[in-house]
Image (spheres, rainbow, N blue to C red):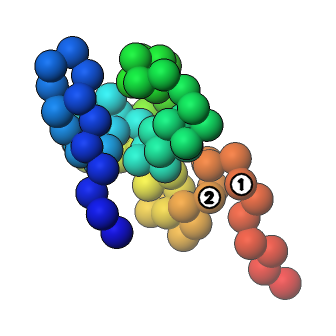
Amino acid sequence: MKTRYITHNGVTLSLKEWAARLKISVGSLHSRLSKGWPIDRALSAPGREYDREYTFNGETKTLTEWGAVFWGSPSAFSGAPAPYAA
């Protein structure tokens, strides 16, 4: 996959670097841009709750990452239904 770069206010970063700087997922940022959001809006709108980072016992992760650690499923907090286990 080709790396996508975005320039905003004179700063050029990859999509991944912008997402890390903004503390949102790359998928969220990519989705915003794919839907035609202006760059300034895509880079200024807050992330969803599960994109934000939380620190527990000195370790910082997103809620999605904590879901994978504690419940074995990254979708535990993502808003997506977890796989059904019979």
Vertical placement of residue 59 versus 76, above or below: above
Left/right of residue 22 with respect to residue 58 in the rendered view: right
Residue 9 sits in quarter: top left
Name the residue: 23% across, 29% down. Answer: 7
Snapshot quadrant of residue 14: top left
Which label belongs to residue 80?
Answer: 1
Q: Residue at x 62, y 49 (%)?
A: 78
Give the amino acid at mark 1: Ala
Picture quadrant where residue 60 is located: top left
Find residue 82 and report its horizontal and vertical position in percent.
Answer: 72, 64
Disc 2 to disc 1, C-alpha distance: 6 Å
- At 33% across and 39% down in the image, what residue appears? 19
Q: Compared with residue 52, is residue 1 higher up or lower down, i.e. above or below?
A: below
13 on left or right of 22: left
Quadrant in which the C terminus appears:
bottom right
Locate residue 30, reporting x and y percent: 47, 45
Identify the mark at residue 60; answer none if there is no mark.
none
Query: Tag 2: residue type?
Result: Ser
In the rendered image, which quarter contains the N terminus?
A: bottom left
Label 2: few (<14), some (14–19) or many (≥20) C-alpha neighbours in 10 Å: some
Q: Position of residue 24 (x, y in %)?
A: 41, 36
Can you tell which mark lies on residue 75? 2
